Amino acid sequence: RANEEIQRFAYIVSHDLRAPLVNVMGFTSELEGADKQLATFLDKVEAERPDLVSQDAAFAVREDLPEAIGFIRSSTQKMDRLINAILALSRQGRRVLTPVELDMNVLLDEIAASLTTLAEDRDAEIVLQPLPAIRHDRIAVEQIFTNLIENALKYLRPGVPGRIVVSGRQDGDRAIFEVEDNGRGIKEGDHERIFELFRRSGEQDQRGEGIGLANVRALAYRLGGTVEVRSQFSEGSVFTVTLPTEYVDEGAVDG
Ligand SMILES: Nc1ncnc2c1ncn2[C@@H]1O[C@H](COP(=O)(O)OP(=O)(O)O)[C@@H](O)[C@H]1O
Ligand SMILES: [Mg+2]
């Protein structure tokens, strides 16, 4: 149950970090307001008694302070996004899973349909091959494949039309799915790292916080499965999701 510990820890930490952060954000706005007052005052003094205004003071009020406040603001906004992401992950981790019969052909059709606009924007096609059915929590499975296909669409090679193929097969009591792309690929040394929280790899030319794959892996583990990557840099990547064909609730076994 180490996972539950971590979930609880993540929840408490992010929750507790939020309060001081909200304070910092609030007082940053006050600083900004105060600086505006000072600037107005400075304009007046400069007009009436220019001999009283030093260059340093004028620079501090008009340049240094606004710049520093801008940096504080963009840093706290970034921190706020990260805290929200951790909260969402831990909330997700504590959600009760409800296994249902999933026709993966239908589910992947729906996911592909929801990504049509993105695919068209990126000049990419999504090819769905016949997939085995499984019995799992719908939202968890949806999140796994949405994230993987979204990534495949995001990290294509410029100038090369994207081709993303989703395939699957059954192997005993496991179902094995692959999401394959012909995109920019991932450097050898980053194959494991990309599954870590907030980790990104390669050129940072796409929006993102580095949370998707950490979530995918956490979800796959929770469903009793795994997710792995094979990739050749600048040729493409294959993400393999292995799941038991039926979800077994470990909690239920303990009673
Ligand atoms: N299909 C892919 N092709 C190439 N690189 C990928 C692919 N999927 C993920 N990556 C790399 O893994 C990193 C982490 O992915 P992810 O956790 O989804 O975060 P994000 O997409 O927000 O960056 C990405 O920034 C990218 O460098
Ligand atoms: Mg992503």
Image: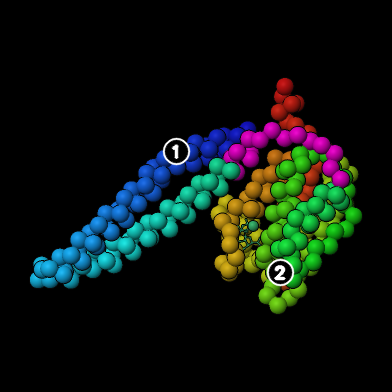
Identified by mark 1, the residue type is Asp
Q: Residue at x 12, y 68 (%)?
A: 48
Q: Which residues are magenta?
A: 89-103
Taking 252 as reference, is 102 above or below it?
Answer: below
Residue in front for this viewpoint, 88 or 44: 44
Looking at the image, is mark 2 or mark 1 nearer the viewer?
A: 2
Where does residue 166 sit, x and y in percent of width and height? Answer: 82, 58
When asked about the image quadrant of residue 44, the answer is bottom left
Q: Is residue 24 left or right of residue 115?
A: left
Badge 1, how many Cα within 10 Å: few under 14, some, many 20+? few
Q: Which residue is mark 2?
A: 122
When asked about the image quadrant of residue 122, the answer is bottom right
Q: Is residue 149 left or right of residue 66?
A: right
- Measure how far apart labels 2 and 1 are at the Cα level: 40 Å
Label 2 sits on a secondary structure element that is: loop
Taking 47 as reference, is 210 above or below it?
Answer: above
- N-terminal of the pair, mark 2 or mark 1, is 1
Tell whether position 33 is magenta: no
In the rendered view, how is the structure colored? rainbow
Q: Residue at x 58, y 62 (%)?
A: 207
